[in-house]
Image: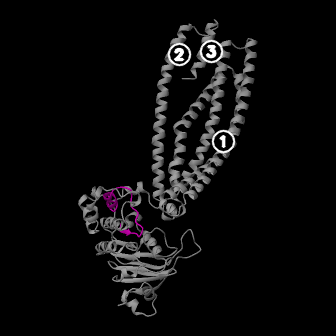
Amino acid sequence: MFMIFPAAAGEMANTAAGKSKYNFQLKDFGYFFAVLLIVQGVFSYFRSYLMAVVSEKGMGQLRKDLYEAMIGQPVSFFEKNRVGELTSRITADVAQIQDVISVTLAEFIRQLITLLIGVAILAWITPRLSLIMLLTFPLIVLSALIFGRYIRKLSKKRQAEIAASNVVAEESLHAYQVVKAFTNEIFERNRYSNIINKVIGVSLQFAKIKGVFFIFLVTFLFGGMFFILYEGALMVQKGQMAIGDLFSFIIYTGIIGGSMASLGTFYTTIAGALGASDRILEILQQDPEIHPTREESGTGKSIKLVGDIRFEEVVFAYPTRPEKNVLECIDLVFEERKKTALVGPSGAGKSTIIQLLMRFHEPVQGRIVIGGEDISSLDLLAYRKNFAIVPQDILLFGGSIRENIAYGNPEAGEDAIIEAARKANAMEFISSFPEGMETLVGDRGVRLSGGQKQRIAIARAILKDPKILILDEATSSLDAGSERLVQDALDNLMMGRTSIIIAHRLATIKNVDKIVVLKEGQIIEEGTHNTLLSDPESIYGMMAKMQMLEIS
C-alpha cells in the first residue's frame, strides 16, 4: 500500500502540470489518498499484531523446547555445564532472538518487500536508470555476507561472556553465606566486574564492525543514488521524462535507498541473533535421555522390579575422566527387601555405585541386572519410578511444605500427604507453624533446620512408596535429638523395601543385613556388623575403632 503513494504523487504532479496520462482531477487524488491511508492503517495494525503473535508464541515454544531439552539431558550433561551458563541460554539468548523476531525481522521483511516492489516499479517507469541501480546490488550483498560472518562470530562470543557473568552472579548469590563468612564481597565484586568488562570489550568490537559496514553501505549506496538522480535530471532536460515521473522516481529512489540502509542495519542485528541461536541449537540438537513430551503419554506405564540387584563385573570411569577407573570389576548383590550398607573412605566408589544403579551413567564394562533382567533394556522413566533417595544435603524447592512433600507423588491426595508427614515424624513441627502445611520453606529450604529438612525429604520418599530406597548419609549432619527422630522415620521408610545405605558413621548401620566395604573402587570386605568386627584384621574393624564404636 505504501508503495502506491510515490506513483500517485508523481501522477498528481503531472495532472497539475496539465500532462496527466489519465483523466483525473486534483480533487480525485485527495479522495484516493484518504482511502489509501485508511487501508494502509488497517493492514499495519494486523501486521503489527500478527508479528507479535508469531513472536510471543514462537519464543514461548522455543523456551519450552529448550527447557525440555535441558531437563531431559543425562547427568553427565549437567556435570559438564554450569547452571548459570544454562540459564543464560534460556534467558539472554532467547531474549535476543525474541527482539529480532518481534521487531527487527518484521521490519526486515517489510523493507525487503519495499525494495523489491520499488525496483520493479522503477524498472517499469525508467528501465535505463533502474539498470544502473541494480548493478550496485551484488557488491552490497557480498559485503553483507562478509561482515555478517564476523558479526555472528562476535555475537556468539558476547553471549558466552554474558553466560559467564551469569554463572558468577548465580554462584555467589546462592553461596552468600560462604561469601559473608569469608568476607569475600570485594573479591566477588571484582570477579564479576572483570567478566562484565570482557562483555563490554566484545560488544565494542561488535559495534566497530557494524559501524564500518554501515559507513560502507551509506557511502556506496547514496553515492550511486546521487549519480542516478543526476542522470534523471538530464533526461527531463532533454524531454525524455515528464517532471511528475522524475518526482516519482526521486521518491522511489529515496525509499529504496532508505530500505537498503535499513536492511544493512537489520542484517547486522539478525546476524548477531544467529550467534545466540547457535548456542541454543547446541542444546536442542543433543539427544536427551528422556523426552518429557514424548514420555507424557506413557506416564501411566510402570515396571515392578522384582528380585535381587546384581552388579556383574562392573567397570566404570566418568566421561570427564575416562583415563581413571572409579570402579574395578565390581561383583555385588543387593538382596531384595534387605538392608545393605556401603562404607569406605571418600572416593572409594560408594556414590558411583548408586549413580550406576539409578542409570545416571552406564557401565564401561559389565552389567547390572534386577531379577535376571539387564536394567539397560528397561524403559528409563518407568525404571526410575521404582527408586527414592534421601540425600545428605537436602534440596527443597522454594514453595510450601505441602508442595515439597507432594513432589514425591504429585497426584497424591491430602490424606496421603499428611500420613507421609506423620510417618516421617514431621507433623509435630509442621503443626507448630501458624500456616502448617502451607508454610513456605524459603530458597532451598533455608527457613527450616537440618532435621526438619531431612524429615520433609523422608516424607517425600514415603509418599513415593519406592521399591528401592537409597539413603546417602541421611543423618550425618544432625544433632542427637534430631538424629533419633530422623532414624525412627527412616526405620519406618525402610520397612519391607530393598534399602541401600551409604554411611560414614558406622553406628547407624549396626543392624543392617549386610555391610560392603569399598576401597579405591574395589570391594575388599562383606559381611554383617558382628562378623566383620570378629575379624581382627578387617578394615571395617579398624574403621570402627577409629570412630570409637563400642565393640560387642
Where the C terminus falls, by quadrant?
A: bottom left
Q: Amino acid at mark 1?
A: Ala
From the viewer's perspective, is the residue at label 1 or at label 2 nearer? 1
- The numbered mark, 3 or 1, whose residue comes first in the sequence reads 3
Q: Residue 20 got which mark?
A: none
Q: Mark 2 highlights which residue? A: 33
Q: Is residue 108 above or below residue 540?
A: above
CA neighbours of label 2 inside 10 A, class few (<14), some (14 to 19), many (20+):
some
Circle 3/circle 1 CB separation < 8 Å: no
- The numbered mark, 1 or 2, whose residue comes first in the sequence reads 2
As measured in the structure, the alpha-carbon distance from the residue carrying label 1 to the one carrying label 2 is 41 Å
Q: Mark 3 highlights which residue? A: 10
Q: Amino acid at mark 3?
A: Gly
Disc 2 is placed on an element classified as: helix
Color theme of the render: one colour
Q: Quadrant of residue 420?
A: bottom left
Q: Position of residue 239 (x, y in %)?
A: 73, 11
CA neighbours of label 3 inside 10 A, class few (<14), some (14 to 19), many (20+):
many
Q: Is residue 389 magenta?
A: yes
Instruction: Please name whichever residue, 247 or 164, is drawn nearer the observer in this view of the structure.
Output: 164
Q: Is residue 342 above or below residue 229?
A: below
CA neighbours of label 1 inside 10 A, class few (<14), some (14 to 19), many (20+):
some
Instruction: Write the residue at 69% across / 22% down.
Output: 127
The part of the chain drawn in magenta is 385-410
Q: Position of residue 373 (x, y in %)?
A: 40, 74
Q: Amino acid at mark 2?
A: Phe
Q: Mark 1 highlights which residue? A: 207
Instruction: Please name whichever residue, 293 or 328, is drawn nearer the observer in this view of the structure.
Output: 328
Q: Position of residue 119 (x, y in %)?
A: 65, 26
Circle 1/circle 2 CB separation < 8 Å: no
Instruction: Write the residue at 50% across / 49% down.
Output: 91
